[in-house]
Image (cartoon, coloured by chain):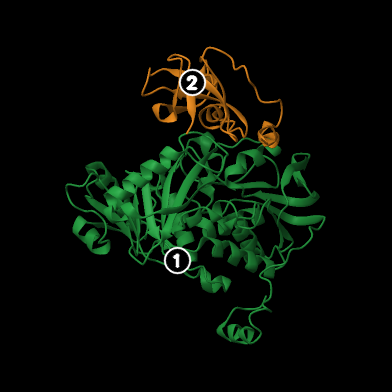
Chain colours: A orange, B green
Amino acid sequence: MLHIYCPFCREERDEEEFSYAGEAHIQRPLDPESLSDEEWGDYLFFRTNAKGIHHEMWYHIAGCRRYFNVTRDTLSYQILESYLISQQPGVRAKQTASAEQGEQPNAN
Amino acid sequence: MKKYSVFNLFTNALSYHENWQRAWRSPKPKSDYDVVIVGGGGHGLATAYYLAKVHGVTNVAVVEKGYLGGGNTARNTTIVRSNYLWDEAAALYEFALKLWEDLSQELNFNVMFSQRGVLNLGHTLQDMRDIERRVNANRLNGIDGEVLTPQQIQEIVPLLNCSPSSRYPVLGASWQPRGGTARHDAVAWGYARGADSYGVDLIQQTEVTGIRRENGAVVGVETNKGFIGARKVACVTAGNSGVVAAMAGLRLPVESRPLQALVSEPLKPCLDTVVMSNAVHGYISQSDKGDLVIGAGVDGYNGYGQRGSFNVVEHTVQAICELFPAFSRVRMNRQWGGIVDTCPDACPIISKTSVDGLFFNCGWGTGGFKATPGSGYVFADTVANNRPHPLAKPFALDRFYSGALIDEHGAAGVAH
């Protein structure tokens, strides 16, 4: 059971109060008409699916009903930070192949 | 390969069963293969078997980071059915079901395929509309299916609470008599033994760490035991497909999530069919050993830890106890999770990629076990001929660009 910190309620609450809203920092294309089929498919369906550090949106559906971002390790399930959607994450995956090295930071 | 037979059983009994031939070899990897299959689960081993048997491609290695059939093949709830809604999916799963029907003879290995029937319960009027639509679609596709009334269901499953006052009233169900269960390990072992007998090298305890490419084509795989050359690389790595794709600089439209299951202590026979309910997120059958095998839902968020959220199990068990009040005192023995690669349209990806000689068979999400033979067959054909098998064509990666998705959330949603 995850304990997620809601930056609006300023409290750590059980995962059941929240619903997952997918990967964070995916911007809607500013000019959808000009996108190729590949770019549009990429925007709609392709995600990083990171094994390791992952930035994702959560919705406090049984609480304040607001969206925010969380940085979580998808292997250890450790939550590293909660932050507002307008902000940038403070914790990032190491450049290149976080997937391949994903297991190392979680050896403990 | 020594054939298993009553005669062999008898002669081996004379030497106290100590001299059976090993089911497969443990060879050292050669430096070069025609095809390297990454992932030694059911789908990967089936691919190797059909490559060798149907296409005569025997210079093949299956590279597995753990042991054969130790991933999701060992973790699923072993349900086999083919009652999918859309023509493309129905054709693929029905093709697999037909292969299941004589798989034990084909492999000379008892996969314990038991066509005990699969029930999908409907609890609301909308459930019943969906069920009737799906059963009609199935019958048009030549797949057996019936819509049952609560009385008929009660006759088949006496322990099910079909009373109108129950928390999840049973309004009806779809019934596929040819569906059932199979022994998950036996499927992997049978295909492994069959592939080995054609000369396929099964290389365990060897993890692929990279995919080497030259001029846009694969030339082999890097492993923790050195480089293995290959003209074609076929990846069948389920939950880790995204990680393997990244090794070749590719992205896949899959997200990896834990799917959980649990088994009870062994009971005397009490449930001789498979009961599933999409609406309350639970499915249950009884294994030959006697334990109730219960499947739960996927976690709501991405994860690679081979465990799952407790609340998911809790909801499933609550639903099972409402449906089967008699099971409320049954103690659970074990619970586990496997990482499934879910696709946006709940259908698999069986596809060539933009890298020459690199193929992917993934995205089976929460329900790949039932398709194991068919998946291996069409994927082997795709790899051998370097073009999609007609049944695999609709499941190519380009559907995410063309928009021709095959939305099987209704039939695939939870119940497997």
Q: Residue furthest top?
A: A86
Question: Secondary structure under badge 1?
Answer: loop
**Nearest the eye: B18 or B338:** B18
Q: Can residue B349 be seen at all in this image of the molecule?
A: yes
Q: Is residue A61 shown left or right of residue B3?
A: left
The vertical placement of B148 against A25, above or below, is below
Q: Residues within 10 Å of mark 1 (few under 14, many from 20)?
A: few
Residue at the spot x=61%, y=63% of the render? B50
Residue at the spot x=42%, y=40% of the render? B312
Q: Looking at the image, how many numbered discs can be counted on the residues?
A: 2
Task: Please give the label number shown on residue A5.
Answer: 2
Amino acid type at mark 2: Tyr
Residue B203 position within the rendered picture, expressed as x and y whole percent measured from the top left: 72, 57
**Label 1 belongs to which residue?**
B289
The vertical placement of A82 against B405, above or below, is above
Residue B202 position within the rendered picture, expressed as x and y whole percent measured from the top left: 70, 60
Q: Can residue B133 be seen at all in this image of the molecule?
A: no
Please state the chain letter of the residue tagged with numbered disc 1 in the rendered image. Answer: B
Q: Residues within 10 Å of mark 2 (few under 14, many from 20)?
A: many
Q: Is residue A90 shown left or right of residue B284?
A: right
Question: Secondary structure under badge 2?
Answer: strand
Q: Determine which quarter of the picture holds residue B214.
A: top right
Residue B329 position within the rendered picture, expressed as x and y whole percent measured from the top left: 33, 53
Question: Image quadrant for the N terminus of chain B?
Answer: bottom right
The vertical placement of B13 against A108, above or below, is below
Please state the chain letter of the residue tagged with numbered disc 2 in the rendered image. Answer: A
Same chain for the residues at labels 2 and 1, yes or no?
no
Q: Is residue B21 shown left or right of residue B377?
A: right
Residue B351 position within the rendered picture, expressed as x and y whole percent measured from the top left: 59, 46
**Nearest the eye: B282 or A27:** B282
Amino acid type at mark 1: Lys
**Nearest the eye: B104 or B163:** B163
